[in-house]
Image (cartoon, rainbow, N blue to C red):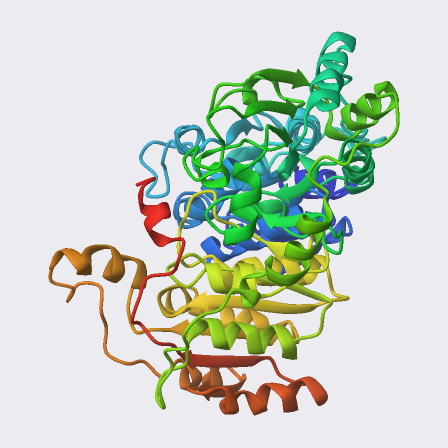
Amino acid sequence: MKAGEAVGRALAASGVRQAFGVVGSGNFHPTGGLVAGGARFVAARHEGGAATMADAYARVSGTPAVLTVHQGPGLTNALTGVTEAAKSRTPMIVLAAEATAPNSNFHVDQDALARAVGALPLRVTSAADAVVMACEAVRRAVHERRTVLLNLPLDVQQVEVPEGALTGVAPPPARPAVEPAEDEVAALAERLARARRPVFVAGRGARTPGCREALTALADRCGALLATSAVARGLFHGDPWSLDVSGGFASPLAAELIRGADLVVGWGCALNMWTTRHGSLIGPDTAVAQIDDDPAALGAHRPLDLAVTGDTVVTARRVLDTLTGPPREGCRTPEVAAALAARLRWRDVPYDDTGTRDRIDPRTLSVALDELLPAERVIGVDSGNFMGYPTMYLSVPDENGLCFTQAFQSIGLGLATAIGAALARPDRLPVAALGDGGALMGAAELDTVRRLSLPMVVIVYNDDAYGAEVHHFGPDGHPLDTVRFPATDIAALAHGYGFDTATVRTPADLKPLSDWLAGPRTAPLLIDAKVVADRGAWWLEEAFRGH
């Protein structure tokens, strides 16, 4: 067997069950090896889309995925999606063919590209080490939570591997849980025992099996309220003491209660500017503790009163075992309970509907969608002025109900995100929420949705503009010709790809969605929602402070 095929087979034998990519001459044989080894391959229409599909699949499934690309332009086309994955610490392997001859048109410094975006570069240097390096790529992706670029030179691919090279290849063992130090556990327990208004904020590191149970048990004991970062939204869904999301997306009540905390504990959460509204959600006298199994993450974004190096589940259980005495009331008063039941959700916050006969208010649209769509859903959201509406107005059943690929804040990733998430959770209705700019950037992947027969609902919040820039620069009188566009019939575009479609200007125009949900769903559905563009989203001003 030649090294190209052997690398693909080794990745599959190492536990990779799903791969995405665009196949060219350089990655034809490695991709064939993946398929022959038992992995499913999904061909995207663009490497950027394939990268984001792999990223989303890995996040939602909890298993590593592979992106396979051609040498040179195949990798450069994928870089934005690879950057998002690397910044999000997604365990993903980018299998890239490589032209090592400097005079090749395809030659670029692929190692440098990987390092520039935060991925870890590895290389197969000979047929003898091809299988070993493939296994190492999977191990490091899983154990270090890294996006790994595995370069596979064209000349090496054609060399025979030693006989029996694939013998004994198996998935790497699970990443060992980091045990917290006893003194750090005791210090956290002591702070929780003294806190009168504790709030837990769970992040990406809390999206692990058993974490909800461990954190809610500890919160019940010390009277803490429960919040998440955007990427962990849904972790505490259904808990009566959940505040939903902390940060720029937080509802007014959630922000008020977080600001009133005397102790904020971040569980696998960076507590960055987005989750804390540039620190404004942390009161001047509020103590801050952070738990993370990566010591480099502790205090990376703000000063801490207590840092604990440890796995979130293990640490929560250790602290719970340390606490003595009866459960504390903390923030869990009857008044807080009544407020949470009545006005926590954004849809419960009163607003003046500014919709017209031609344009629907995005809040009204989102509330109606939340009522119509089945509860078992998985949502992929693009970036833009609109993004807070589907992110916060559409409920999700758990932490795998929302795939939030926003670490790099690129528009154009939303549709591919929904595709990857849909393949990871085929038991749920996939929903892609896009702006018109992102929808047109990623439109090629409408073909992938149709080709895979995904029963997906795509909602385009269409204001014929890059709305974030309109609302950021418009109030200062700047000309906006560069960020506004003529009306585009995105429904007609999707119809050409084989979608069922509807154009929505008023709530009554959503009847085709009701009919589609009740029917056989033989084709995906795209809703081109013409939304009002009279104001920036509530989170926009806060977001632009980070630019």
Quadrant showing the C terminus? top left
Q: For the point 57% across and 90% down, which residue is it?
A: 512
Residue 126 coordinates in the image, percent (x, y): 60, 26
Asked whether the viewer can see residue 264, the reply is yes
Outermost residue, front direction? 335
Seen in the picture, residue 258 relative to 400 is either above or below; the reply is above
Instruction: Decide: is 189 above or below 350.
Output: above
Any part of residue 91 in sight: no
As drawn, is 511 to the left or to the right of 474? Answer: right
Residue 392 figure quarter: bottom right
Quadrant location of residue 88? top right
Residue 51 position, x and y percent, is: 52, 50
Instruction: Kindly indicate the quadrant of the structure image that contains residue 419.
Output: bottom right
Q: Nearer the viewer, residue 86 or 48?
A: 86
Which residue occupies the foreground of this view, 440 or 339?
339
Camera-nearest residue between 46 and 132? 46
Locate the N terminus and report the quarter of the image it occupies.
Answer: top right
Does 526 sit left or right of 385 as displayed?
A: right
Classify 243 as above or below 275: below
Q: Position of residue 404 (x, y in %)?
A: 55, 51
**At which x and y percent is residue 105?**
32, 43
Q: Residue at x 71, y 13 (%)?
A: 187
